[in-house]
Image: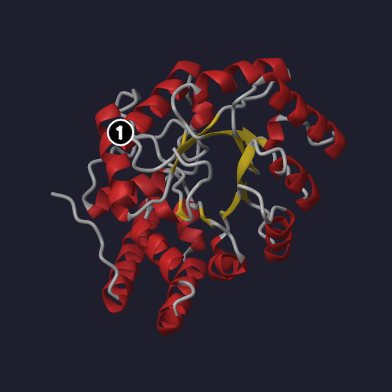
Amino acid sequence: MQNSLPQGFIPVMLTPFKENGDIDFDGLTQLTEFYLEAGAAGLFANCLSSEMYELSEEERLAITKHVVEVANGRVPVVATGTFGGPIAEQAEFAKKIFAMGIQAVIVITGLIAAADESDDVFMARMHELLRLTPGVTYGLYECPVPYKRLVSAANLGELAATGRVIYHKDTSLDLENVKAKIAATEGQVFGVYDAYMEHAAASLRAGSAGLSCIQGNFFPEVIVWLCKNVNEPAQQENVQRVQQLLIDTMPVIHYAYPTVAKYYLHRRGFPISLFTRRKVELLTEVEKVNADELMEIVTQLSDTIGIDTLTFS
């Protein structure tokens, strides 16, 4: 396995459930293949979109192992491995999930230090985590739950310089902040993957390694296309069209997520239940109509640009 994550789209994976609430592992196989066929450069399993907080420790390990086995070395897989408590306890689970064959254990920054604790405390605990888990590589995720703890560019540079932290999912929503993080980690085996799609094209042009966004659970082919074509001179008009689509559709994408993403995939013909363990807004008939309209817009844009979209029998 390569030492750094590839450039491109790394989806934050959904977890398919059966109607009785059990994990649908056959569905997870199909979903993993869907991301790969769409052109994903890597996979982020056991994340917030996966409803990781609603999974047991055994389920977190099981879905991660399953995704690694289905991917079978075609792309690297990362997965969340810190869920709060003393750092020694977090280190033990990090070692367990790393043993599933992933390339990096993702650290939830808001579970390393509390909101009222300083960056010095956060960094001390990160270094303790590294010390307790020799040989384990990590990534950082500024997850909005339990609270969004942003990592400074300087601290990110310090962690990347250890050679053990290779991935960062940025949710700062601030392009200048993203640029600072890219600059601070220059020359390291490291990649910044942006989650905020209102500046997706600008972030990629600034040097982000790729995108890791929930939009990829609706139309991953479009996100893959953007990653590949953002710097192509002949495609700049189409790049702007895609960027505007990402801006205009933010409200539909975020409301009742991830249920709405499962609904959207179901409408595309993908065999997935709408069952969601996470407590989110109710997916009303109005929201379903909005998702249907979004699908029509994406289909039309894809046809205009020439983006190949997957179909399901």
- Residue at the image position 55 percent from the left and 57 percent from the top: 209
Specify the quadrant of the image occupied by residue 218.
bottom left
Looking at the rendered structure, the kind of residue marked 1 is Val
- Residue at the image position 34 percent from the left and 23 percent from the top: 22
Specify the quadrant of the image occupied by residue 137.
top right
Judging from the image, the colouring scheme is secondary structure
In the foreground, 119 or 196: 119
- Image location (x, y in percent) of residue 114: 78, 31
Q: Residues within 10 Å of mark 1 (few under 14, many from 20)?
A: some
Q: Is residue 219 visible?
A: no
- Image location (x, y in percent) of residue 189: 61, 47
141 vs 299: above or below = above
In the foreground, 171 or 161: 161
In the foreground, 286 or 192: 192
213 vs 174: above or below = above
- Image location (x, y in percent) of residue 244: 49, 74
179 on left or right of 66? right
Q: Secondary structure at mark 1?
A: helix
Numbered marks: total:
1
Q: Which residue is mark 1?
A: 70
29 vs 265: above or below = above
Q: Which of the image's four quarters has the N terminus?
A: top left
- Residue at the image position 63 percent from the left and 52 percent from the top: 171
- Residue at the image position 27 percent from the left and 74 percent from the top: 306
168 on left or right of 65? right
Q: Is residue 63 visible?
A: yes
127 vs 269: above or below = above
